[in-house]
Image: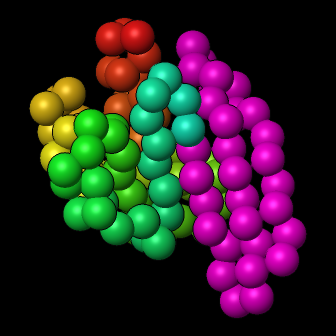
Amino acid sequence: MEVLQNKLISEELTLNSLEIRLKGTTLLLLEGYGAFFMCGALDCTVYKEREVVCGRALGVKTIYELYNAEIRDVSSYALTKGIVPGMKVYEAFKKIRKEV
């Protein structure tokens, strides 16, 4: 297992990135402004009773693919903040950043 932690700075966003390289797969996570988005390994329904803004994108292989990916699922709380499936991950972070 290899764990890589970095910063992703793009446009007006500064995000923390985490890659966990496992045999046969890589887990990807972007975090910032009180929210996080992950690869398909995230089960958003786990967060249905919590005030957590999170979502997942499918089919991504790199942090940059995740950043530009379409969000497939979001937590219930993310919906209350205007984060919806179909939105790009970077668009969601921009929206959340305005609220912080």
Q: Taking 91 as reference, is 87 left or right?
A: left
Q: Position of residue 58 (x, y in %)?
A: 41, 68
Q: Position of residue 95 (x, y in %)?
A: 33, 21
Q: Quadrant of residue 62?
A: bottom right
Q: Position of residue 33 (x, y in %)?
A: 49, 23
The main secondary structure of the magenta stretch is strand
Relative to residue 23, is residue 9 depicted above or below?
above
Can residue 6 be seen from the camera position used here? Answer: yes
Q: Quadrant of the N terminus?
A: bottom right
Q: Residue furthest front?
A: 49
Q: Quadrant of the C terminus?
A: top left
Q: Quadrant of residue 72?
A: bottom left
Relative to residue 59, is residue 77 depicted above or below?
above
Q: Quadrant of residue 93?
A: top left
Magenta span of residues: 1-30
Q: Which residue is found at the position 64% from the left and 23% from the top?
A: 14
Number of labels in the image equals 0
Q: Taking 69 as reference, is 72 left or right?
A: left
Q: Which residue is found at the position 86% from the left and 69% from the top?
A: 2
Q: Taking 19 as reference, is 44 left or right?
A: left
Relative to residue 2, is residue 55 depicted above or below?
above
Q: Which residue is found at the position 56% from the left and 38% from the top?
A: 31
Judging depth in this view, the residue of 77 and 98 nearest the camera is: 77
Q: Position of residue 73 (x, y in %)?
A: 26, 58
Can residue 85 be seen from the camera position used here? Answer: no
Q: Which residue is found at the position 38% from the left and 58% from the top?
A: 56
Please tell me whether residue 6 belongs to the stretch shown in magenta.
Answer: yes
Which coloring applies here? Answer: rainbow
Please tell me whether residue 50 belongs to the stretch shown in magenta.
Answer: no
